[in-house]
Amino acid sequence: MIYADNAATTKMSDAAIQVMTDCMKETYGNPSSLYSIGQKAKEVLEEAREDVAKVIGAEFPREIIFTSGGSEADNQALRTAAEIGKKNGKMHIISTAFEHHAILHTLKRLEKEGFEVTLLDVHENGLVTPEEVAAAIREDTCLVTIMFANNEIGTIQPIREIGAVCREKKVLFHTDAVQAVGHIPVNVKEDNIDMLSASAHKFHGPKGTGFLYIKKGIPVTNLIEGGAQERGRRAGTENVPGIAATAAALKDAVENLERNSSLTKAKRDRLIAGLKEIPHSAINGDEVTRLPGNVNFCFEGIEGESLLLLLDDKGIQASSGSACTSGSLDPSHVLLAIGRVHDVAHGSLRLTINEETSDEDIEYIIKSVKEVVEYLRSFSPIWRDLVAGKKEFIL
Ligand SMILES: *Cc1c(COP(=O)(O)O)cnc(C)c1O
């Protein structure tokens, strides 16, 4: 089996599994309890917070709020900015058309509450420019939220420059960095970030844990009422084993980031070169400014879903669009945002590899995708029309 869907989720690292099971067996106390096993759990929790803060370049550990994952962190960041905006009479938010649904759906909700949302165009290459962000900022803008790296096409935004624009114009800046943290260098201070979301299961940590970085001084809106955990900013007994494993996975990922990313990039580029040989195909998103492990293609005249099923038969686990949208007939909002027409967007394939993907795996994927695309085209009515000249090729 070749697992090539690391953008959907990753396998937990051995280090994270070890820390998690040790914690479950030995430090099972409630961090709010005053006796020793509770206090030990509290120590594990605060150590994890310090580690996470350090790794992402936060100034203070208390700037980290542990959450149930990326979606919750995104929701809390947007709610926080919206509450501040409401208080100051600033009801305008800037984002992009190709954000994760955790952002887009929260923005939809905020629109119903009276906010105005500007979604910036991401261009054909899957990138926004700091100049466009600057031009969209108004007197009443309370937040700019732009993802660090896209989960489908892997393009990496000029976050540091966008952050600088927001600082200059005194607008809060949030980034959904779920695909970036642990994969490419991220530093909240150097990158001018006020709020950042991350999720452990995207960097070889456990599912159901993540964190939100909120710069000191920003009044946090709490989504979950209850006890005073996380300084009253996120109630509920802390997921200590998950949090400890999150910190372990993140440290491991960041310590090995350079080595892993250069190994992965070399394999990614070979995979891209191999898939480019397929006629009437095109890569989605900028070829260079993309995550080390992301390969995303469109093949004209086929359906992504059939492609996935046939690749699965060959032992290759991949994705077409995002996990949240597959199963629906609508093409990916990300591919539409970069200007792919419906027919073309339907024939997409996302392969997200990592340093463990072998060179043989890469060659096998190339060979298999070539075979499957050719096979599907052999009985595709759209392909027949294209070849007969009844329809024009787009790619
Ligand atoms: C996976 C993902 C999320 C959601 O994270 P969960 O921990 O699964 O809730 C949010 N944003 C991006 C970009 C993602 O890739």
Image (cartoon, rainbow, N blue to C red):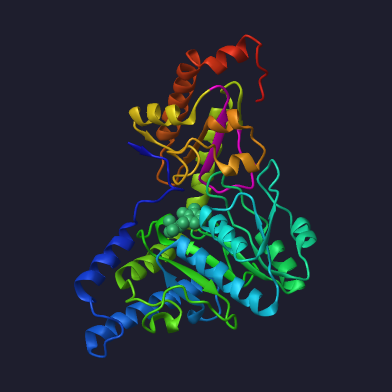
The foreground one among 247 and 322 is 322
In the rendered image, which quarter contains the C terminus? top right
State whether residue 259 appears in this view.
no
Residue drawn at point x = 46 percent, y = 19 percent: 376
* Position of residue 17 measured from the top left corner of the image (x, y, whole percent): 29, 61
**In the image, is residue 114 above or below residue 40?**
above
In the displayed orientation, state which residue is furthest to the bottom.
34
**In the image, is residue 82 above or below residue 119?**
below
Q: Is residue 291 magenta?
A: yes
In the displayed orientation, state which residue is furthest to the left.
25
- Magenta stretch: give its range: 283-301
Residue drawn at point x = 42 percent, y = 69 percent: 67
Residue drawn at point x = 38 percent, y = 64 percent: 209
Image quadrant where residue 174 sits: bottom right
* Position of residue 374 measured from the top left corner of the image (x, y, whole percent): 49, 18
Q: Main secondary structure of the magenta part?
A: loop
The foreground one among 299 and 10 is 299
Q: Judge left or right: residue 120 versus residue 346.
A: right
In the rendered image, which quarter contains the N terminus? top left
